[in-house]
Every structure is written in structure tokens, then in C-alpha cells.
Amino acid sequence: MREDKILLSHGSGGGQMLELINGLIIKNLSNQYLKEMMDSAVLKINGKKIAFTTDSYVINPIFFRGGDIGKLAVCGTINDLSAVGAKPLYISLSLILEEGFERESLERIVESIKKVSEEEGVLVVTGDTKVVEKGKGDKIFINTSGIGIVEKDLELSYSRIEKGDKVLINGGIAEHGTSILNERLNLKLSNPPVSDCKPLWKIVNEVLKVSDKIKFMRDPTRGGIASTLNEIVSKSRLGIELYEKKIPIKENVLGLCELLGLDPLYIANEGKMLFIVGKEDAEKVLEKLREIGEKDAEIIGDVIEEPKRVLLKTSSGGRRIVDILSGEPLPRIC
């Protein structure tokens, strides 16, 4: 349903966000790149494939177990480039600061940006800084854009997905969102969740070395794996069946979800990649993921022809529909 005013749910990664993007942005600005709605646009320039992406970060709180808004911004941009098979090379960094924001906090954030970018071999090559009046912002917002190069003869698209393909993930779900929620609610848990925020290019690159049957990749951030898989189903015009017993989730994450009545399938991740892989290579890809340190990686589902929805085979043997996210359970999660 179309709303007359912008709501928090328009940024959730769910149905209302898709309605806003398709009904307003794509409708008015559509072109061959934008309508694909990939994590990054892949532009062909002088015979080379150049990937270009952008993202904004408004997370609250700005410091959390496992990272901060600076680390999140660099990792998020690296991961969006990685999702199209592009080696990240350059990023821009734009800061919107609120008057009165502590300089020490800004220094910590910039140090995080420096650490991740140096470790990943990515250069911050341009940027912008603006300051708004006190009360007109919330400490700090960050925008980053990224440029990478697709070096392999690689075609990742919804159209390559077919019945029988396998769905893989490189580790446990819902760690980022539950970490943020724990910080906001100040739950004082003895074993609190830690955000999975990390760059994924090195992991993706290793996977691409062992298989040419990678059909599609996407990092399931806002809206969790449920929203990402629903988008894949919508674009591929196929279905996906998930197996609850196979979906990796840490006990402290599951415990927090049960305590608060949340479905972990819909909770954000910041260090996970979903891979759609030809069934003949699925075990090989899984083995490689575990070999390089992703010990909780799993094959979590199959691509099916019908129904053209996301289904979950529960641990008890039943099946339920995993629909697209409605509303906004966790605003400002990234």
C-alpha cells in the first residue's frame, strides 16, 4: 500500500522499501543498470567491467560489540562490490556531523575506517564533510561509494538461477541485528551477541577460484535472509525452500530472539553472503568456505520451481511461508 508520508518501514529492506524504490525511484530514473537492482552496478568501460556502488549509514548506536559506524561503512561498501564479484579498489567517504559531536568519537571512527581499508587494500580517494546544527542530526551519518573491478569472466544475475541450485551461507545469521538490539535495550546479558560486521571480498574471491557455478550472490543486510531471498524469488520467478535445521545460528542470538519474540530470518547481517550455486559445485564451495575459516557455513536450501515463494521446512517437519518483511522491527540497524 502506498503511503503519503515516508515511514521508518520505507528503509527496512522489506515490502514498503521495495514499493518506494520501484514505484518512485525506478519508475522515474530507470535505465539498464538501475532496473537490475543489484548491490552494485557493473559498468562496461573500454572492455573492462567496473563495479560502482553507494550506501549510507545511520546506525544507532554508533559504537557496538564487533564494530562501529566507520567499520560498518567500509565493510558494507566492500561487501556490496564483492556481491557482484568485483575486487574493491577505491571508496569515497562523506561525513554528516552534528554540532557538538565529540572529536574523540570521530577520531575512533576514522581509525576504524583506516584499519579496515588498509587491511583490505582499499584507498579512500575522495570525500566530503558537512556539519548540521545541534538537534538537526544524530551525532554522525556516513555515506560511502565504492569502485571495484570484475577481473574474472563472471556473470552473476537472477536469470542464471535455475531449479536444483543450492543456497549457501558462510555462517550464523542475525548476529549484527541482535548485537545492536542488545546495546539499545541495555540488557546486560552474560553472553551478548557480537556483530558479524566484516569485509567479505577475500572470502568471495576464494569461492570464485574453486567454482564457475556461482549463479548469484547477495549480502543479506536489512531485512535479513528472508527479505533477500524473497527478492531473489521475485526476480528469478522461482521458489526457494529453506531447511530450518541447516540454518546456522548461535545460541546467544537465538536466545535473544526468543526472549524478544523476533524471527532471526528477518534480522540484519553485516558479515554474511548468500551464494546461489549449481548443485554440482555446492559441496565443493561449502568445503572451501569451511577451509578458509567460515566453520559455520552451511547449505541451507534449494531452488525449486513451485511454489514461487520462500518456504521453510521447520525442525518439526512442517512447512511455512517466509513472506517479505512488513513494517520495521529494527530501524537504523545499519
Image: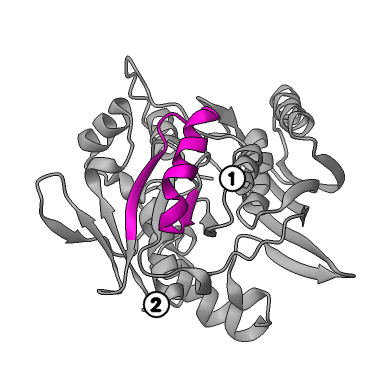
Pick whichever, 37 or 169, lies toward us.
169
Q: Secondary structure at mark 2?
A: loop
Task: Quadrant for residue 228, please give it.
Answer: bottom left
Q: Residue furthest top?
A: 190
Determine the CA span between mark 1 and mark 2. 28 Å
- Residue shown at 76%/34% (left/top)? 117
Foreground disc of the pair 1, 2 = 1
Q: Position of residue 139 (x, y in %)?
A: 64, 38
Residue nearer the viewer, 63 or 265: 265
Place of residue 201 in the rendered image (x, y in percent of width and height, measured from the top left): 65, 42
Residue drawn at the location 59% of the way across and 74% of the way down: 36
Q: Is residue 29 left or right of residue 266?
A: right
- Amino acid beneath label 2: Arg
What residue sits 56% from the left and 80% below the top? 24
Does the segment drawn in magenta span residue 279?
yes
Total count of labels: 2
* Residue 243 visible (yes or no): yes
Q: Which mark is residue 101?
A: none
Can you see residue 130?
Answer: no
**Residue of label 2:** 237
Q: Which mark is residue 210?
A: 1
Q: Which amino acid type corresponds to the residue marked 1 in the rendered image?
A: Val
Q: Position of residue 95 (x, y in %)?
A: 75, 44
* Quarter of the image where one finds residue 178: top left
Q: Which residues are magenta?
A: 274-302
Is 130 placed left or right of 12 in the picture?
Answer: right
Kindly give the residue lying farthest to the bottom in the view shown: 28
- Point out the tag, 1 or 2, that comes first from the N-terminus: 1
Badge 1: residue crowd in 10 Å (few <14, some 14–19, many ≥20): few
